[in-house]
Amino acid sequence: MRASLAALLLWLPVAVLAQGATSDLFRAMDANGDGRISEPEYVAYMSQGFYRLDRNHDGILEQDELPGGRGKPVTLKEWQDNLRREFHKLDRNHNGYLSPQELAQPPR
């Protein structure tokens, strides 16, 4: 379950980037317009995927709500904890913010 969740979370930024230009994505994530993306901004933006999948709005992605209809249930907290870990992998200079370049690169 953890492996499939991790794979899904690794795939999400790539899928989002594929839908539009990095600069458009960066502007959408940069909620306060300061030219950098904080962890709370990243988590809030990327949590939209969870909210879209959570059809019954109970804060848990059940098996039938998961891509492919397989896997163990995932809570919003688990989802967001994984996003936070992903953020820190993307933050290569460890300054607590993502630059456009860091956002565009695959996580390590």
Image (cartoon, rainbow, N blue to C red):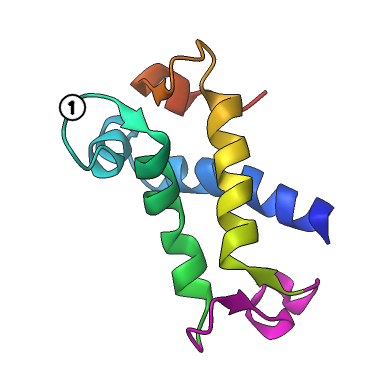
Which of these two is toward me, 2 or 24?
2
- Graded by Cα atoms within 10 Å as few (under 14), some (14 to 19) or many (20 or more), the crowding at tag 1 reads few
The residue under the point 55% across, 53% down is 80
Quadrant for the N terminus in the image: bottom right
Residue 13 % position (x, y):
51, 42
- Residue 68 shown in magenta: yes
Q: In this view, does 69 lie to the left or right of 26?
A: right
Q: In this view, does 103 lie to the left or right of 92?
A: left
Residue 62 % position (x, y):
68, 81
Q: In which quarter of the image is residue 21?
A: top left
Quadrant for the C terminus in the image: top right
Q: Mark 1 points at which residue?
A: 34
- SS assignment at label 1: loop
The residue under the point 61% across, 49% down is 81
Residue 16 % position (x, y):
45, 47
- Residue 19 shown in magenta: no
- Up the image or down, 1 lies above or below 8; here it is below
Q: In which quarter of the image is residue 77?
A: bottom right
Image: magenta residue range: 56-72
- Up the image or down, 61 lies above or below 37; here it is below
Count of all numbered marks drawn on residues in the image: 1
Res 106 visible: no
Res 49 visible: yes
Instruction: Name the kind of residue labelled 1 in the image.
Output: Asp
